[in-house]
Amino acid sequence: MPEELQVTLPITGMTCANCVATVERNIKKVEGVNQAVVNLSSERATVELNPNQASVDDESPGSGAPAMTLLLVRQTWLFSA
């Protein structure tokens, strides 16, 4: 079984359950993500991923804004802190 890494990402701007479902569904589409649970009240996503296929960087390239970025082989999802 591949090694797994669990990370918690801050997610801002969600206002309803539909936002949660949309963010969760799109995180789960990412290659290397095995599980994603998004919580509206805590504004966080808990993500289990395979570190050989995806990784997490704590800096938003070029923006200077604090962010957590889930870096992928072909896609980058940016979640602002």
Image (spheres, helix red, strand yellow):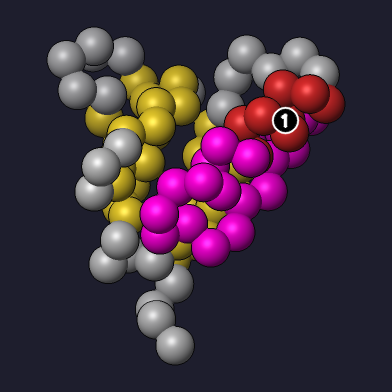
- Residue 13: % across, % down: 62, 13
At which x and y percent is residue 24?
64, 39
Q: Is 31 included in the stretch rendered in magenta?
A: yes
The residue lying furthest to the bottom in this view is 1
Residue 45 position in % (x across, y down): 61, 41
Per the image, the residue denoted by label 1 is: 20
Residue 5 vs 40, above or below: the answer is below
Specify the quadrant of the image occupied by residue 77: top left
Q: Residue at x 56, y 48 (%)?
A: 28
Residue type, mark 1 in image = Val
Q: Give the residues drawn in magenta, as a range.
A: 25-44
Q: Position of residue 19 (x, y in %)?
A: 72, 22
**Image-based side of 32 in relation to 29, left or right:** left
Question: For this view, does 1 lie left or right of residue 66?
Answer: right
Find residue 75 and report its image quarter. top left
Q: Secondary structure at mark 1?
A: helix
Residue in the picture at 79% in, 23% down: 18
Dot 1 crowding, Cα within 10 Å, few <14, some 14–19, many 20+: some
Seen from this angle, which residue lies furthest right?
A: 17
Which quadrant, please, contains the N terminus?
bottom left
**Count of numbered circles on the image:** 1
- Residue visible at 44% across and 47% down in the picture: 30
Residue 8 visible, this orientation:
no
Query: Is residue 36 placed above or below 5 in the rendered structure?
Result: above
Q: Is residue 76 visible?
A: yes
